[in-house]
Image (tube, grey):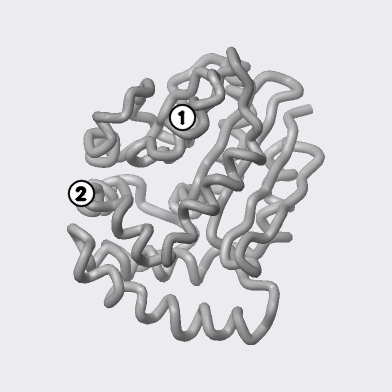
Amino acid sequence: MSRAGLDKNPREVAEMFDGVAKGYDRTNSVMTLGFDRRWREWTRRALDTRPGERILDLAAGTAVSTVEFASSGAWCVAADFSLGMLRSGARREVPKVAADALHLPFADESFDAATVSFGLRNFQGTVAALSEMARVVRPGGRLVICELSKPSWKPLRELYRNVALRILPAIARPVASNPEAYAYLAESIRDWHDQRTLGELIEQAGWTDVAWMNLTGGVAAIHRATKP
């Protein structure tokens, strides 16, 4: 695996996620001290799915979030470019599609909303992916992004960047199916945009009414926007 930059090699990233698919959800809970569950719940609230809506959950992984979004009665599809991830979530009874975020296999204006949880930073082109999501969402539809971000309080930001992210691979080692991959994931988090910059990229991709909310002091953040 090449070092994480903002230009990702899709094949390498897909292979990396195939390698961590086994036990991925358990590893996430261990590494985040269980905060991942709270973050998914806040994302579900922000998405505010309704019965009969069509929802695209992109970079859905094992579809753990997709199932939660579908609990409202919405029709939700889990899309991911890692076949290993989709296979690991096979027991979850939602539609699953292998998909490239930059070339989604869906018609224009197919969905009422699109969402990505902790996957946007792994796409090869952030604005291109956000634009492609805008293509498949109807006018007036919604975008919700939950992603790891930059803590707003400087002491926490320094602790997170210089301590927590450095020990992330060691924390993952006892429970992950491919611990070495978490060195890449830690670096992708460190190199990722802050909240305001991501909001500006969402606007560049054609979305409007962009707003964000910090979670856990800014360790994660939810961005919400509307397609004009």
Number of other residues with Cα within 10 Å of mark 1, as a class: few under 14, some 14 to 19, many 20 or more: few
Lower sequence index among marks 2 and 1: 2
Give how far across and how far down residue 208 sits, in percent.
79, 38
Give how far across and how far down residue 116 sits, in percent.
52, 41
**Residue at the spot 74% in from the left edge and 44% down from the top edge:** 203
Image quadrant assignment for residue 94: top left
* Three-letter amino acid code at the position of disc 2: Lys
Residue 22: numbered disc: 2
Image quadrant assignment for residue 178: bottom left
Comparing marks 2 and 1, which lies closer to the viewer? Answer: 2
Number of other residues with Cα within 10 Å of mark 2, as a class: few under 14, some 14 to 19, many 20 or more: many
* Three-letter amino acid code at the position of disc 1: His
**Residue at the spot 36% in from the left edge and 74% down from the top edge:** 168
**Label 1 secondary element:** loop
Image quadrant assignment for residue 165: bottom left
Q: Quadrant of the C terminus?
A: top right
For mark 1, what is the residue?
A: 103
**Label 2 secondary element:** loop
